[in-house]
Image (spheres, rainbow, N blue to C red):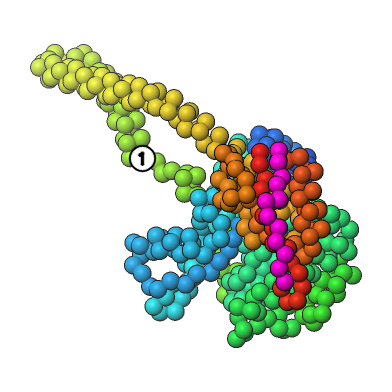
Amino acid sequence: MAKTTTLYIEDAAIKVLVNNGKKVEKWASAPLEAGLVIDGLIQDETKVSEEIKSLFSREKIPTGRVIAAMSGLKSIFRIISLPAVPKNILDEAIKNEANRVIPTPMDQNYLSYQVLPSAQGEVKVFIVAHPKNTTDSVIKTINKAGLRLEVLDIAPLALCRCANLEKVIIVSNWLDNVDIAVIIGRIPEVIRSLSLPVESQSVAERISTIAEELNRTITFYNSSHAESPLDESVPVLVSGELANEQDSWSSLLDELSNQISSLPSPFIAGEGFDPSVYIVNMGMALRALPAGTEHQNSLININAMPGFYKPKGTSLASILVPTVIVLLVGGLVWGWFYIDDMKQKNNVLEPQVQAQEATLIQKRAELSALNSQIAETQKSLDAANPVVTALNDMLWDMYQGREAITGDYKAIYNLHASNIGFYTIDYGPYQGDKIVTTTNVLTIRGYGLTKTAVLEYAGILRGSNRWQNVIITEMMETVFNSEPIYYFEIVLIN
């Protein structure tokens, strides 16, 4: 059975696993400097690619084809249902429905999907919208490392593949990242990937936050599946750092009475192998193994690599032109020696020799014409190079601008306390009559449980020194459920 190499680039480490069937042959990891990768987005592709090269070289892992996974942070997972449509318009129908159900702008995401087994007359599709900047950074980094990326997986989907159960809840955390999945009928019905607050340092604080998110996930699922809610018969499997914190499992479940245990390793490995550390790598490797009747793993095997990144097939012309040239040159050489030999053997064949020479002249002319065509093609390619360079520069400028806006959104969210909520966060011209500005601004509209909470939040935004001006343009008190609430509008100007 062919070996499979899987690569997972986390915020703090690179993890590589080589397996042969269900046997782990080699595993290795290398730490990354803080800030090289943030929430799955690679900030310095060159440095991270060099770390990958160093790890492969140090561990003597052959470079070549790999399966890699990107973080699930900021990815959105949905199951949609469409009426049965012809295959030639299915792709367009899926994209239209994704535009309707995905809450973030689709021009910032790539869309990947997998058609699921469906009842007659309908088409069920599992879709995932994953951020373009994160996806691009992972693919470009792997290419710079000299590896050939065959499949781009998404970490929580790989994690779901490790649970050999029809119905299960999975909770996995590593450092500040948490993945929670509800699998029903071998299909992830709900997936949540989130980053824990920076201030959650202790184990107890992390467990408490994860328990809240787990309860919120179960409540969300039950509210949309009232006919078949999750009950205590559904097991909870934990992985990552949680697998080594058995004393805290009771706190994780809080008031739930579900059976809880570690997510078992789907592979066999030697002494010293910690499956909870490489669980995402093993989930990626499972997709390369043949399915068996005893398997109940997740059915989702999406390849999230955009089509234009996938290796292009070899064109017929690129094969025929060199072949024709080789054949022509070979024919010329063979013909020359053949004619010379015939001259020496029998002068009676002189007329035939002359005919062969004429043929050679014709072939040389054909070869010369072919060389001229090749030269013209090269000139066209050279002329196109400046255009390609200009487009690449334009894309990089757009990327840098998008990164700045993404950083602003993240800072707005990370700096808010639990007594502050948001309605909208808009970027663009100011839509109001409180201030006058000619530049694009960030407008936050939300509510605070107290007036002080709103003022403190505005003060924290000012103290971050990320924006030149932080203006509270509106704050209005109203009563909700007999309690006062303060609606506010804050404008951030650079």
The span shown in magenta is 468-479
Q: Can residue 382 be seen in this view?
A: yes
Q: Residue 315 magenta-drawn?
A: no
Percent x, y of residue 99: 48, 60
* Disc 1 residue crowd, few under 14, some 14–19, many 20+, Cα 10 Å: few
Dividing the picture into quadrants, the one containing residue 314 is top left
In-image side of 219 versus 365 (left or right): right
Residue 119 lies in quadrant: bottom left
Q: Is residue 20 visible?
A: no
Instruction: Name which residue lies at 43% across and 71% down.
Output: 82
Where does the N terminus fall, quadrant-wise? bottom right
> Label 1: which residue?
315
**Residue 476 lies in magenta, yes or no?**
yes
The picture quadrant where one finds residue 366 is: top left
Q: Position of residue 336 (x, y in %)?
A: 25, 18
Across and down, in percent, residue 419 comes to 78, 63
* Prevalent SS, magenta region: strand
Report whether 288 appears left or right of 385. Answer: right
Q: Could you tell me which residue is drawn at 48 percent across and 28 percent down?
A: 389
- The residue at 72%/71% (across/down) is 479
Q: Which residue lies furthest to the bottom in this view?
A: 227
Q: Which amino acid does label 1 sit on?
A: Ser
How many numbered circles does the render carry?
1
Give the SS element for disc 1. loop
